[in-house]
Each structure stands twice: as structure tokens, then as C-alpha cells.
DNA sequence: TAAGTGACTTGTGAAATGCAAGTGAAATCG
DNA sequence: CGATTTCACTTGCATTTCACAAGTCACTTA
């Protein structure tokens, strides 16, 4: 449980260092990608994602992402076994970071998913607006679902 | 030594996954930042950077960055002890990624270096143009220095 | 030629990771 | 209603990576 005030000793005050300390590992951004672009929101879905994260690592990353305020973790009111993972506004604000990383790799590495790449290349602003809109719709709906 | 053709087994073809496999650790992007923004180009400078990377990790990351074509490693012709590390075009193309990570952290975390942040916020395009121009100047000069 | 310098390597213990198996609560099936 | 599944994890263990300290070695400078 850390926030702006109580976050533990950073290696430096550099904002890039902060990002790297929070997101700099081999899995966190992939989980965020699955939530942002594929609308994944359950443990099982993340586990079955193509890169095959180990279950203990997944549990750890989800906890850390929540601690950093990037996702929320809630029980599904209609099925008490299920847990629903959702991006916060802070999490959705990572869309530009993901977009630039996708563009960089698409340009310099041999990668697939050219559909996504072309979509981002074509109009970055519109792509980001789309992601944000999708997220707003889902958040509003899920709030309504929980009986507001 | 890996390139588009011979790179080893990726976990998936997703371009974001490629970026994460190459850059997803706690140090690589900081080294790139030091080269891009602070004009660092020697081992000693990286070692003395504020986040205090361990020397074996630094050597390992520099090797990997070179293997991925993000930096070049050359001996200094005027002092054979010294090694000069330089960003390639592929490396300088990471500027937008760094910029977005800086903006995200500046917005959501408690960080310093507000000068840099404001510079990027004020005009992202111009900031990127500046980085690229700086790099071009240095690359041209260093090529000339080596007797072309 | 003796004393640095710069760029590393090596050794060691601690921490993070990957893999397989197991747990426990809640839902669904027969 | 009891048995089986489903879901979200936890536990154990071997392997890999990391951090820290010390040492090496080619080269340069005094």
C-alpha cells in the first residue's frame, strides 16, 4: 500500500526512474496491455494469455499494480469466486507509453500484430481516444452494475 | 549478437512483448536516458549516475543493448583505455517512449526534475526534435573525429 | 618506471523467477 | 444433497538474476 506520500525509498527523484521502478519488469506492462486492449479482467484470462505468465508471478504483479494504484481488485457480486481486475485512471494513462513501445518495436523488431500497429500509426491521438472511451464506458457500466 | 532474423525465441509476436523483453528491467532505460539526455558515453559516468547501478549489471546491460542494436561500443582512438558508448538510430528512436514514461510518472508520482518535465509538457514534438538534433550533431562529429 | 585510470571480471549471498503441485471457497451438476 | 468443477490463488523447490565488494589488467600519466 503505497502512494505519493508514503512510497518507500526511490533510487532517485527522476520521473523516468519512478516509471522504471514501477513498470520495469518482464510482465507488468503485458498485464496492463491485456486489460487495456483485450479487455481482460480475470486471473484466468491473464494466465492463459499468450506469453504464459507463472501463476505466482501473476498474483504478485496484480498485488503490486494495485498497491501502485494502477488497477483495482474487486469481487464479482454475481459470482463470489471471481475477482474483477480493472484499470484505474492512472492505469489507463499508460496508453501513450504502450503505444510508443508498440511503435518502436514494430519499427525495429520483427513482430506480428500488424493490425494494432497500423491502427496506432494511422492516428495515434484517435487510438488513444478510443482506448480512453472504451475504458470510460466499462467503468461507468461496472459502477452501475454494482447497484448505484 | 542477435537481429531481426536470428533473435531467439520470443514469448510472443506482440510488439509490446518485444519491447518488454528488450527493455523490461530496472536499468536499461536509465542507461539510455543518461546517453540521450545527459550525453553520457563512458562506463565511469554510468556507474556514477544517481541510481548507482552495480558494475557487473552495467557491463551486462551494455552488452545486451549493443546486441540489440541500441548502442554501439567503440574504443576511443585518442585513449585506448576508454570505450565510447553511443546510441544508434534505433536507440534514439526510444525518445518518445522515455518522454511518455516521464510524463506519466510526473503526473501520477511524486518526482523531481520538473525542468525536464515542463520541457516535455510544453512541446513534446519540439523536445523530440531537439533530442534527435543533438544526437545527429554528435554522431556526425564523432564520425569525423575518427578520420573520415 | 611507479602510480594511477578506466573498464571491466570474479566471488558470494540474497532475492526474484519459473515450474509443478496443492488448497479452499464457491458454483454447478446429477 | 453430495460430488465434481471452477476460480483464484499458495507452497515448495530448483534455477536465474541481482547487489555488493574485491580484484584484474591494459593503458596512460607523472
Image (cartoon, coloured by chain):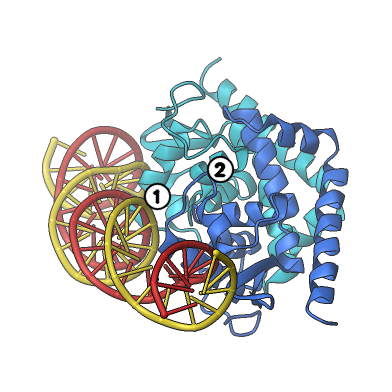
Chain colours: A cyan, B blue, C red, D yellow
Q: Is residue B24 visible?
A: no
Residue B67, image x, y percentages: 58, 76
Image quadrant where residue B147 sits: bottom right
Which chain does the numbered disc 1 sit on? A
Residue found 77% across the figure and 31% down from its top: B118
Against B69, is B34 above or below? above
Q: Residue at x 57, y 45 (%)?
A: A35
Task: Name the side, left or right, on which B47 lies relative to D2.
Answer: right
Q: Which mark is residue A85?
A: none
Mark 1 is surrounded, within 10 Å at the Cα level, by few (under 14), some (14 to 19) or many (20 or more) other residues, namely: some
Sequence order check, earlier mark of 2 and 1:
2
Q: Would you place residue A141 above or below residue A81 in this image?
A: above
Residue lying at 49% horizontally and 43% vertically, measured from the top left: A21
Nearer-the-camera pick, B33 or D11: B33
Residue placed under numbered mark 1 in the picture: A58
- Circle 2 marks a residue in which chain? A
Which quadrant is the N terminus of chain B positioned in? bottom right
Q: Could you classify mark 2 by the number of other residues whose Cα lies within 10 Å: few (under 14), some (14-19), or many (20 or more)?
A: many
Residue under numbered circle 2: A17
| Front tag of 2 and 1 | 2
3D distance between C-alphas at marks 2 and 1: 23 Å
A88 sits left or right of A133 in the view: left
Residue drawn at x 86%, y 45% as measured from the top left: B125
**Helix, strand or loop under label 2:** helix
Q: Nearer the viewer, residue A77 or B50?
A: B50
Amino acid at each position: 500500500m503505497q502512494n505519493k506520500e508514503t512510497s518507500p525509498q526511490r533510487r532517485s527523484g527522476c520521473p523516468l526512474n519512478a516509471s522504471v521502478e514501477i513498470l520495469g519488469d518482464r510482465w507488468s506492462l503485458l498485464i496492463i496491455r491485456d486489460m487495456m486492449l483485450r479487455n481482460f479482467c480475470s486471473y484466468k484470462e491473464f494466465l492463459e494469455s499468450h506469453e504464459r505468465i507463472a501463476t505466482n508471478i501473476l498474483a504478485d504483479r496484480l498485488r503490486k499494480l494495485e498497491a501502485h494504484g494502477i488497477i483495482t481488485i474487486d469481487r464479482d457480486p454475481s459470482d463470489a469466486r471471481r475477482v474483477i481486475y480493472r484499470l484505474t485512471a492512472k492505469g489507463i494513462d499508460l496508453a501513450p507509453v504502450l503505444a510508443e513501445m508498440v511503435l518502436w518495436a514494430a519499427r525495429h523488431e520483427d513482430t506480428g500484430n500488424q493490425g494494432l500497429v497500423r491502427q496506432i500509426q494511422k492516428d495515434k491521438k484517435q487510438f488513444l481516444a478510443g482506448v480512453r472511451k472504451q475504458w470510460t464506458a466499462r467503468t461507468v457500466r461496472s459502477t452501475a452494475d454494482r447497484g448505484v
